[in-house]
Every structure is written in C-alpha cells, then in structure tokens.
Amino acid sequence: MKKNLILNILHLRLFVGTLGEKDYFSWWSSAFFTQGSQAFLDPIFPRTRLLAQCNGVTRAAALVHDEHIGVGQTYHLFRLPEEMEQAIHRTLQALGLVAQFSEDTTRDDLLARLKQLAVPGQPDAVGPVWVGSRQDLKDMDKWHQVAGLYFQGFHSNNTVFPYFS
C-alpha cells in the first residue's frame, strides 16, 4: 500500500473527524478534539492521546456514516478494509502528528488544510454520495474527490457522506 495514500487518508480522517465534532459543524456528537479534551485524555493516554482521539472520532463518525450509507459492501473514510485500517493505525503510531493537532487548531485552519487535499466537489451534494468502487479505494484522485465533497459540505452546511461500493 502506498505510504502517500495512507498519509493523505489519515490527514483527511483527522481533518474531517475534527470538523464534524459538536464544537465545529456537529455532524456527530463526539468531542475528542475539542477544547479541554487534552486535560481529560492526557492522564489516561499520556503517550498515545492522538491515537485515542483519532480512534474515538473515527468510531463516532463511522456510526453516523453507517446510519446514512448502510453497512455491508460499502466503505467510507471512517470504515475501510482491514488492511487499510491497519496501515492507518501504524502510520498514526509512527508519526509525530501531535504538534499538528493541538487544541489551538481553529476551524479555519482545519478547513484550509482540508481544502489543500480537495478537488472541487459537487456544490449541491447532500447525504450519501457514491465516489467509486472498492478498487477505487487505492486511487488518490478519488480521495481528493472525497476531500472536495466534505469541504463543500462543510462550506455549504450540508451533511455529506461519500462512500465506495
């Protein structure tokens, strides 16, 4: 699996996961990356706080995505095939991303980072949006489309759930 692809998906997951939390766009009700979460998580996960935050927001976002898309032969940013999930987990453990995701990161910072990964999405997209087949999960261009759909969704305040099947 290409390291660049996994790193981009990881960044996309962190940006979208954080922006979807209740203190930003409130697409899911979690608060793993909100102000004060560090004080709660650091005593429990002193060396792996970012991993715990990412796992928590991934689970919260996956539940909401699954409610709208369904479960079965579909995949989305927060529920991928096992080999991709393991690669993301290994990458997250290996990288020093903590400084990039401090409590001081603003909504505008996250949107700007998401926009850097995006190609323009469908401006009127709402709800589940099919992006491609399972084989397309390893296509970087498809993930840029996914980033564009999320960016457009946040920008227009429309919940969108890109998926592969």
Image (spheres, rainbow, N blue to C red):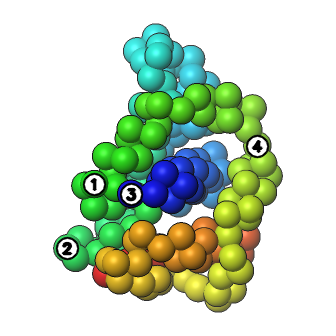
Tag in front: 3 or 2:
3
Q: Amino acid at mark 4?
A: Thr
In the depicted structure, whether residue 144 falls above or below residue 130: above
Q: Amino acid at mark 3?
A: Met
Tag in front: 1 or 3:
3
Q: Which residue is mark 3?
A: 1
| Residue at 54%, 55% in the rendered image | 4
Which of marks 2 and 4 precedes in the sequence?
A: 2
Q: Which residue is mark 4?
A: 106
In the depicted structure, whether residue 24 falls above or below residue 119: above
Residue 155, given in percent of the width and then of the height, sits at 73, 70
Tell me, yes or no, if residue 141 can be seen here.
Answer: yes
Which of marks 3 and 1 precedes in the sequence?
A: 3
Q: Secondary structure at mark 2?
A: loop
Image quarter of the C terminus:
bottom left
Q: Secondary structure at mark 3?
A: loop
Which of marks 4 and 1 precedes in the sequence?
A: 1
Mark 1 vs 3: CB contact within 8 A: yes
Mark 2 nearby-residue class (10 Å; few <14, some 14–19, many ≥20) = few
Which of marks 2 and 1 precedes in the sequence?
A: 2
Q: Which residue is mark 1?
A: 83
As measured in the structure, the alpha-carbon distance from the residue carrying label 1 to the one carrying label 2 is 17 Å
As measured in the structure, the alpha-carbon distance from the residue carrying label 3 to the one carrying label 2 is 23 Å
Residue located farthest toward the front when viewing the structure as drawn: 2
Residue 7, given in percent of the width and then of the height, sits at 53, 50
Residue located farthest toward the left when viewing the structure as drawn: 72
* Residue 130: quarter of image: bottom left
Q: Which residue is mark 2?
A: 72
